[in-house]
Image (tube, rainbow, N blue to C red):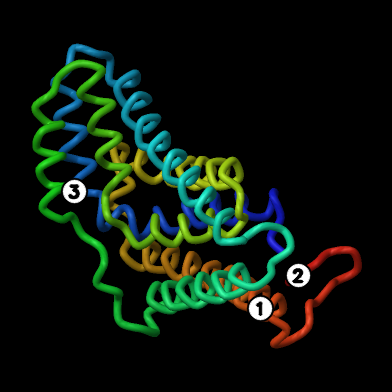
Amino acid sequence: MLNLTATPIALLLSGLLGSFGHCLGMCGPLNLIVTARIRENDLPLGLSMVIYHAARIVVYILLGTLVGALGSLLGLSTHLTGIGGVTSLALGLTILLLGLGYLGWLPSLAWEGAGGWWNKALSSALQRRGGYGVALLGAVNGLLPCGLVYSALLLAASDGHAWSGALGMAAFGLGTFPALLGLDLGAGALEIRFRQSMVRLAGALMLLVGSQLLLRGGAALGIWNHFHWGSIALW
């Protein structure tokens, strides 16, 4: 089954691959607006960018802690039984659907985009100056409704521990860092074909993770048998 090292690695790869395609398209314009605003501060640009992305990743960590704790309450621990198996089935199916969407085999799920509350929060953050304003902008970006983040949170919840959820989302946030930072260095000009390829790779990774969670949940419920490869429990 997914262990305490596999989940952060999967989330790191998901953030890295998905960000070069998905984030540059969805968050690129936002990031350029934020960067322009940050340049107006008296703080050095390098320090401002560190504060901005650190605040964004801290929000991911807090969300990971929350969903990991929720996963624990739902029985998503090492040995699944009852409701934990059902929850793992539901998580696996949801991640599979997300993966199929990123591969272009299903219509995009309409749960992305900034809502009214988020736009208001961004407008308020853009009016703040100094380090506090930069950190607030990063935190608001961390709360941006995003399918890639949602899928990462679902996977972070699957380990069933608050601390492993936090670790997984920290890995995811670090994975998104190169693409968003590189946007200021011209990464936004990457060919659309390359960006689409990265999104598809992220989708393929989601299919693998979703399938594993689906198989794990079904085995816990006795629908099919657990499967081991040597000493490794695959599900």
Residue 10 screen position, x and y as percent: 59, 56
Residue 234: give its label.
Answer: 2
Mark 1 or mark 2: whose residue is earlier in sequence:
1
Q: CB under 8 Å between callouts 1 and 2?
A: yes
User: Which quadrant of the view contains residue 178?
Assistant: top left
Residue identified by numbered label 3: 29
- At a point 29% along the width and 22% down the height, the residue shown is 48
Residue 7 screen position, x and y as percent: 62, 54
Type of the residue with mark 2? Leu
Residue at far top of view: 42
Crowding at dot 2, Cα within 10 Å, few <14 / some 14-19 / many 20+, comes out as: some
Type of the residue with mark 3? Pro
Above or below residue 172? Residue 109 is below
Residue at far right of view: 230
Please identify the quadrant where the N terminus is shown.
bottom right
**As rendered, which of 94 and 35 lies closer to the eye?**
94
Please identify the quadrant where the C terminus is shown.
bottom right
Work out how far the residue at label 1 is from the one at label 2, CA to CA, in angstroms: 9 Å
Residue 57 screen position, x and y as percent: 41, 37
Residue 215: give its label.
Answer: 1
Mark 3 or mark 2: whose residue is earlier in sequence:
3
Work out how far the residue at label 3 is from the one at label 1, CA to CA, in angstroms: 39 Å
Above or below residue 191? Residue 95 is below
- At a point 19% along the width and 35% down the height, the residue shown is 34
